[in-house]
Structures are given as structure tokens and as C-alpha cells.
Image (spheres, rainbow, N blue to C red):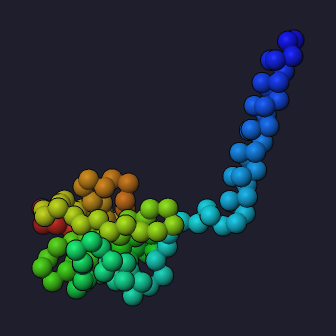
Amino acid sequence: MDGGVDGVWVQFLGSLLAVVLIVLLTWFLGFRTAAKLDSEAEATAQFQLAPGGFEPASLALDRQGASAIARDAQGRIAVLVPHGTHFVVRLLNEGSAITARDGVLQIAGIESLQLDLGESAERWQTPGN
């Protein structure tokens, strides 16, 4: 084989090894953990950080702490959506379809989010769903 081709393979394998080592290092340092809510107080604080403000009057946590849903005094509904190791507040459009099935909420337009609320899921369902 040509010496140039061997050099390309050595460089490729060295780069691949470096990437694998970086991934392993970040894994062992704990950067793999997903966002988790430990209490309603923590969820309330996250909702209050929403741009424009959002003060929950009613709130429900996902049973695994993976997300939350809240309603304010004006009737607006927002959810906390995991984004890496943090949460993002998403204010739902008025009339967004929220369905409850077997204790799990599904919100139209956010198919990747399912809130496991157990028995309290039914009270968050929008009428007609």
C-alpha cells in the first residue's frame, strides 16, 4: 500500500479513539443524567422562570419527575419539557387537545411528551377528548 493511504488510516483511527475517549469521560463524569423534578416546589420555581411569567394555580408532576403540567389563574396551561439536564416551559395554545389514557396525558403537538399522572390525569384532559 501507498504510505499516504496508511497515514490516512492511522489519522482516522487516532481521531476515532479520541472521540470514544471523550464520550466515555463525559459518561463517567455524570453528564448522562436527564432532567428530573423532585418536588412540586421545584416545578413551581421552574414555571415561574418562564418568559413573561407563569404562576401556577394548579400543578401536577409526572410520577417519574420527568415533566409537569400547570394551569395559572387565567386558565393558561403550560408544561415543563425536559431539554438535556434542564427543563423548558412550553405554554400551550388555547384549546390544545389534551387526552388522558390509562393515567397518561398526551398533548397534541408535543407527541414526544407523555405525562404519567396516574389518577389525576383525567382532570387535565380537555373537554371532548
Q: In the depicted view, which residue is nearer to us: 5 or 122?
A: 5
Residue 118 drawn at (x, y percent): 37, 74
Q: Residue at x 37, y 78 (%)?
A: 46
Identify the residue shown where x is 15% and y is 83%: 73
Say left or right for 126 vs 29: left
**Residue 62 is drawn in which quadrant?**
bottom left
Q: Is residue 48 above or below residue 88?
A: below
Q: Please give left or right for residue 49 compared with residue 55 in the image.
A: right
Q: Residue furthest front?
A: 4
Residue 96 placed where, x, y %?
17, 60
Q: Is residue 127 above or below residue 25?
A: below
The residue at the far top in this view is 1
Q: Which quadrant of the structure image shows residue 108?
A: bottom left
Pick the quarter of the image with the C terminus. bottom left
Residue 61 visible in rendering:
yes
Task: Identify the residue shown where x is 80% and y is 17%.
Answer: 5
Q: Give the total of numbered labels.
A: 0
Pick the front one: 120 or 2: 2
Residue at 49%, 62% in the rendered image = 84
Q: Quadrant of the N terminus?
A: top right
Q: Position of residue 109 (x, y in %)?
A: 26, 53
Q: Is residue 118 visible?
A: no
| Residue 64 x/y as whole percent | 48, 73
The one nearer the camera, 10 or 57, is 10
